[in-house]
């Protein structure tokens, strides 16, 4: 898969001939759960991007709105004003692909105009399906949302095409489609997650996104309780069985905090275990805050699995 000006061989991280790539997180927000406010000016962000690249990041993911549980939505204009200058700076000053972390079509369009190379959508192209174009999460009733979910899970998907999917296709860029839904009312948990992800894939394909430009993300920490997050991480290979590269994003998340009873600034070791699990299960990419530590964990895991140095 070509992302920006680089080729990514996204066939799984365990075999010696394949890599597990690293997506470095750049949150330009004041309220992200882990590093809110640290990188929301150009000077600090520039230094942090340089450090992430030096430590082994393969792509930088820029996000302008926190998606932590209980976050407050910001306006489209505010999100655009946050992310566009940082994307422009990175594309001008560094030779590395950039992804835009957003679920809002207008934000994504401006990010793509600014040079973003990949769309990373935490709603898997389905936000408009659940909430309407530009509407807030309170715009639909619970019954409406339940009907939408049952339509995607039980009836094998819908025939809609969302604006974000169309934008992604028109700009001919890859996308990462994360699993998400408005509630946790699963009938058959893993089967429902797989069907939801297939619905996201179908929306992308209908819009004209090439199959070889799609990455899937299990959505750890989104619409899942602790047990469900642990189950999905342990059964990651079942998502890989869909035939698409999988990105694992567990970095410093509540799954680790709840499992170890630790605050967000003490979850690096737990994150590394999930990264190792991801490599062993065949993840093609991990999205992380702590680049150096995760890079070493990936390389050591691959060395053991393949009985040879894999750097």
Image (spheres, rainbow, N blue to C red):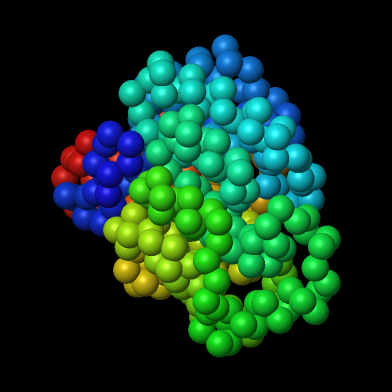
Q: Is residue 168 left or right of residue 213?
A: right
Tell me where residue 242 appears, x and y as whole percent: 37, 72
Residue that appears at 56% across and 87% down = 155
Report the label total.
0
Tell me where residue 8 appears, x and y as whole percent: 27, 44
Q: Is residue 102 left or right of residue 141?
A: left
Q: Is residue 221 above or below residue 74?
A: below
Residue that appears at 65% across and 83% down = 150
Q: Quadrant of residue 75?
A: top right
Q: Is residue 43 above or below residue 193?
A: above
Would residue 52 be visible to someone looking at this image?
Answer: yes
Residue that appears at 45% across and 22% down = 90
Tell me where residue 267 appears, x and y as whole percent: 60, 41
Viewer-proximal residue, 37 or 302? 37
Residue that appears at 50% across and 72% down = 199
Q: Is residue 306 left or right of residue 94?
A: left
Question: Where does the C terminus fall, quadrant-wise?
Answer: top left
Q: Is residue 279 above or below residue 95?
A: below
In the image as oriented, which residue stretches furthest toward the bottom?
A: 155
Tell me where residue 300 appears, x and y as whole percent: 30, 42
Would residue 296 be visible to someone looking at this image?
Answer: no
In the image as oriented, which residue stretches furthest toward the top?
A: 43
Viewer-proximal residue, 102 or 269? 102
Q: Is residue 28 left or right of residue 273?
A: right
Q: Quadrant of residue 210?
A: bottom left
């Amino acid at each position: 898969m070509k992302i920006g000006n680089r080729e990514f061989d996204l066939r799984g991280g365990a075999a010696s001939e394949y890599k597990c790539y690293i997506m470095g997180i750049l949150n330009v927000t004041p309220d992200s759960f882990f590093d809110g406010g640290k990188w929301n000016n150009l000077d600090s962000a520039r230094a942090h991007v340089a450090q992430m690249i030096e430590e082994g990041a393969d792509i930088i993911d820029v996000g302008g709105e926190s998606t932590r549980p209980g976050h407050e939505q910001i306006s489209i204009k505010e999100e655009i004003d946050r992310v566009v200058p940082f994307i422009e700076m990175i594309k001008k000053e560094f030779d590395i692909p950039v992804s835009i972390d957003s679920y809002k079509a207008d934000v994504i369009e401006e990010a793509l105009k600014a040079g973003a190379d990949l769309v990373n959508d935490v709603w898997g192209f389905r936000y408009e399906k659940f909430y309407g174009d530009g509407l807030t999460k309170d715009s639909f009733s619970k019954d409406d949302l339940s009907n939408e979910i049952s339509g995607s899970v039980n009836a094998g998907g819908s025939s809609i095409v969302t604006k974000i999917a169309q934008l992604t296709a028109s700009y001919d860029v890859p996308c990462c489609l994360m699993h998400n839904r408005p509630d946790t009312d699963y009938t058959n948990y893993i089967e429902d997650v797989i069907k939801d992800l297939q619905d996201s894939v179908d929306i992308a394909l209908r819009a004209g996104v090439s199959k070889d430009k799609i990455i899937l993300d299990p959505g750890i920490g989104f619409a899942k309780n602790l047990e469900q997050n642990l189950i999905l991480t342990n059964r990651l290979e079942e998502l890989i069985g869909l035939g698409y590269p999988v990105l694992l994003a567990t970095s410093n998340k509540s799954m680790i905090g709840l499992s170890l009873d630790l605050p967000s600034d003490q979850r690096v070791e737990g994150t590394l275990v999930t990264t190792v699990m991801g490599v062993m299960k065949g993840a093609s990419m991990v999205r992380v805050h702590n680049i150096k530590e995760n890079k070493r964990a990936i390389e050591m895991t691959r060395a053991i699995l393949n009985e040879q140095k894999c750097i």
